[in-house]
Structure formats: structure tokens, C-alpha cells
Image (cartoon, rainbow, N blue to C red):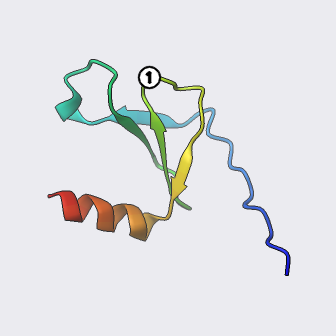
Amino acid sequence: MSIAPHSAQDLSGAKWRSSSYSGGNNECLELAHEVPAFAPVRDSKDPSGPVIPFGRAAWGAFVSHLG
């Protein structure tokens, strides 16, 4: 059985936001908003590094669990 790779989405124009709790010191995760298919997350210390594409439902459950 083969697994089809996920299609890459161009995130070059994405608007990345970090948590207001980070204090602006670039030591947190950033989330790209306005991406309908998934919730892309990256490390604020390495903005050109890898992006983890969480499903919207999974990211919502994670955030709900934190609150």
C-alpha cells in the first residue's frame, strides 16, 4: 500500500502570530492564520525551519485542553 504525500501549500505570504504570553522574546510557537486546510505551526526561533501542519480539529482540541 502506498501513501500519497500531502500537497505542499505555499506559506510564503502567511501571517504568522505568536502568543501574547510569549512576551515578544521569540521563544514560542507561531501559528499561521487564514490557512483554511490546516493549522501550520513553526518555531519562532527558526522561521525558515520546518512547519508542522496540524489538522484544524486537532489544533482546536489541543488549545481547548490548555485552557
Instruction: List the single residue furthest toward the right.
Output: 2
Instruction: List the single residue furthest toward the bottom.
Output: 1
Tell me where residue 21 appears, x and y as whole percent.
17, 33
Q: Is residue 16 left or right of residue 23?
A: right
Instruction: List the single residue furthest toward the left.
Output: 67
Instruction: List the single residue furthest toward the front.
Output: 1
Q: Quadrant of the C terminus?
A: bottom left
Q: Residue at x 40, y 37 (%)?
A: 30
Number of marks in the image?
1
Q: Nearer the viewer, residue 17 or 34?
A: 17
User: Which residue was labeled with disc 1?
Assistant: 45
Q: Residue at x 26, y 36 (%)?
A: 19
Q: Residue at x 45, y 33 (%)?
A: 43
Tell me where residue 22 appears, x and y as whole percent.
22, 29
Q: Residue at x 48, y 38 (%)?
A: 42
> Residue 24 appears in which quarter of the rendering?
top left
Q: Is residue 52 left or right of residue 67?
A: right
Amino acid carrying mark 1 in the image: Lys
Q: Is residue 6 left or right of residue 19?
A: right
> Residue 49 appears in which quarter of the rendering?
top right
For disc 1, the neighbor class at 10 Å (few under 14, some 14 to 19, many from 20) is: few
Q: Quadrant of the N terminus?
A: bottom right
Tell me where residue 12 appears, x and y as whole percent.
63, 32
Q: Secondary structure at mark 1?
A: loop
> Residue 3 appears in which quarter of the rendering?
bottom right
Q: Looking at the image, is 14 positioned above or below residue 61?
A: above
